[in-house]
Image (cartoon, coloured by chain):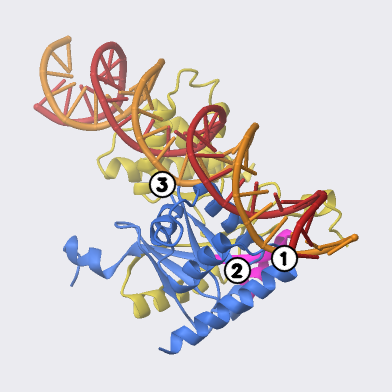
Chain colours: A yellow, B blue, C red, D orange
DNA sequence: AAAACATATTAGAATGGTTCTAAATTAGAA
DNA sequence: TTCTAATTTAGAACCATTCTAATATGTTTT
């Protein structure tokens, strides 16, 4: 497993980064962070809670929300609010954007070599035209995923 | 006012488009649509309700939600879910993207000549890499707006 | 123009994700 | 080890959105 080493490295680096900002590391925080680094399913709070319930059976939802807020503040995680009022989360190690299925809600990562340049171009335009101080860019493509195309008989 | 003619045209065209899809035009629907065409403030449902309360004092929130759903289905309006659990709406006449202020929540339109090409490039990559059937693209740049930069003493 | 019917509107209740609160616990510094 | 501020917890509160069932209305047909 090549991923394992990478993910361990990411965990170590992320924890270092958090500590450097004067934030305490608790077992809850480490386990939530590890879950996000090792699960690229853009989980909701509920999904995270279910995913680590064996390790932390008494974990409060408030703790998950607090931890995520901390991770967002430390620029390790981004929030993906959806139309159903919920929010899903994404450990943002490598820059990428998202395709979201309008039928089943699945979120798919899209990695594109040119993406960082494109994001920079959009950010520059925003800076120039609106005077914003930019902190981040999010691209979301809506559509129907291959599985749902089949289900809905939309496939060729 | 050059805008006035444009906005009237947009209203007429939008209503025609809706009717063509077999949807009834009611006073509520027309007033909500007109409000969205003439107010580029990315309003929430509450803001819309307040904005047209003089014309429709007894308007139910359910009607606003229903109307917006219809307008989204007819591709006249896009939804902008935010982190606070609310959704804001945008009449999407001319393609553009958004800058959102992390401090005050304001959403600012950014118009860029190259944007349609950039969106197409991102959509092509998504089609090729993920097999999605694409229906739309959303770009959101996070940052601090000029006013909040001043408030927060972040200005140069 | 009137009747008929499917569709839309309304008020208020229900839902459910997120935030708040106050008490108990704990990480990390001294 | 002791201390203290930060964190966690359980559950209540909040609030945007959705649902429901009764009422009203826009279109089509006669």
Look at the image and tell me in which quarter the N terminus of chain B lies.
Answer: bottom left
Residue for point 68% across, 73% down: B17
- Mark before the other along the chain sequence, 3 or 1: 3
Q: Position of residue B154 (x, y in %)?
A: 20, 65
Q: Position of residue A37 (x, y in %)?
A: 52, 42
Q: Residues within 10 Å of mark 3 (few under 14, many from 20)?
A: few
Name above or below for residue A22 compared with residue A60.
below
Q: Position of residue A78 (x, y in %)?
A: 46, 50
- The answer as to whether the residues below labels 3 and 2 share one chain is yes
Observer-side mark, 3 or 1, equals: 3
Name above or below for residue D6 compared with residue B106.
above
Nearest the viewer among B54 and A99 is B54
> How far separated are the C-alphas under marks 3 and 2?
24 Å
Nearest the viewer among A128 and D12 is D12
Question: Which residue position holds label 3?
Answer: B84
Observer-side mark, 2 or 1, equals: 2
Name above or below for residue A113 compared with residue B94.
above
> How far separated are the C-alphas under marks 3 and 1?
31 Å
Query: Tag on residue B76?
Result: 2
Farthest-out residue, bottom: B2
Question: Which residue position holds label 1?
Answer: B127
Please, which chain is the residue tagged with disc 3 on?
A: B
Boundaries of the magenta span:
B120-138
Asked whether residue A91 is in view, the answer is: no
């Amino acid at each position: 497993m090549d991923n394992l080493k990478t993910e361990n490295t990411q965990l170590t680096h992320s924890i270092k980064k958090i500590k450097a900002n004067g934030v305490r590391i608790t077992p809850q925080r480490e386990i939530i962070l590890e879950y996000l680094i090792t699960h690229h399913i853009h989980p909701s709070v509920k999904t995270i809670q279910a995913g680590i319930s064996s390790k932390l059976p008494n974990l409060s939802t408030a703790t998950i929300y607090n931890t995520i807020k901390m991770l967002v503040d430390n620029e390790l995680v981004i929030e993906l609010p959806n139309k159903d009022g919920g929010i899903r989360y994404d450990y943002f190690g490598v820059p990428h954007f998202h395709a979201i299925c309008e039928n089943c809600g699945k979120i798919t990562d899209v990695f594109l070599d040119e993406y960082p340049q494109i994001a920079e171009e959009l950010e520059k335009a925003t800076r120039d035209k609106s005077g914003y101080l930019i902190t981040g860019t999010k691209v979301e493509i809506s559509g129907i995923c291959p599985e749902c195309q089949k289900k809905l008989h939309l496939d060729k």
